[in-house]
Image (cartoon, rainbow, N blue to C red):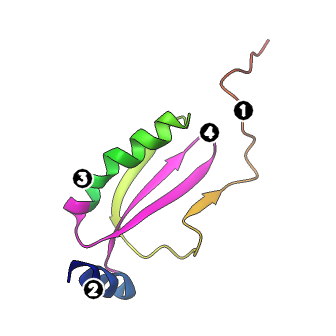
Amino acid sequence: MKEIWTNILQRLGSAWWVEVITENPHCTYYFGPFASSGEASRSQAGYLEDLTQEGALNIKAVVKQCRPKQKQLTIYDEKEPVVSRATVFG
């Protein structure tokens, strides 16, 4: 029943999502949909932990009620250069 309710909310644009933006790689990730902000918030920690373990830097997350416009839920900004943490400058 919960899944049906979440699908209805998603179609109405009222479902909750965790939007995560990382600086390196420069990406936007959408995790969801969720039926409530509390459910999304409880899931957020696991997503942030996974991205940290993958080496993502400067991670910012927000729980919001929306319907992502993109079918692809991981959006890479190819305009931004990706610099490895191992790169030494100067």
Q: Earlier in the sequence, mark 2 or mark 4?
A: 2
The CA distance from mark 3 to mark 1 is: 31 Å
The CA distance from mark 2 to mark 3 is: 20 Å
Kind of residue indicated by mark 1 = Val
The percent coordinates of residue 68 (x first, y second) are 48, 73
- Compared to residue 89, the image places residue 22 above or below, namely below
Residue 59 visible in image: no
Q: Amino acid at mark 3?
A: Arg
Q: Which residue is mark 3?
A: 42
| Quadrant location of the N terminus in the rendered image | bottom left
Few, some or many C-alpha atoms within 10 Å of disc 3 (few <14, some 14-19, many ≥20)? few
Per the image, is 15 magenta?
yes
Q: Secondary structure at mark 3?
A: helix
- Residue matched to label 1: 83
| Number of the label disc, if any, that sits on residue 4 | 2
Other residues around mark 4 within 10 Å, as few (<14) / some (14–19) / many (≥20): some
Which mark is nearer the camera, 1 or 2? 2
Q: Which residues are magenta?
A: 14-39
Badge 2: how crowded within 10 Å, few (<14), some, or many (20+)? Answer: few
Image x and y of residue 81, in percent: 75, 41
Q: Nearer the viewer, mark 2 or mark 3?
A: 2
Nearer the camera: disc 3 or disc 1: 3
| Image quadrant containing the C terminus | top right
Q: Identify the residue position indicated by label 4 in the image.
A: 24
Q: Earlier in the sequence, mark 2 or mark 3?
A: 2
Using residue 72 as the reference point, say whether residue 87 is left or right of it.
right
User: Considering the numbered disc 2 on the image, is that residue within a helix, a strand or a loop?
Assistant: helix
Q: Earlier in the sequence, mark 1 or mark 2?
A: 2
Q: CA distance from mark 4 to mark 1?
A: 7 Å
Residues at marks 1 and 2, CA–CA distance in whole angstroms: 42 Å
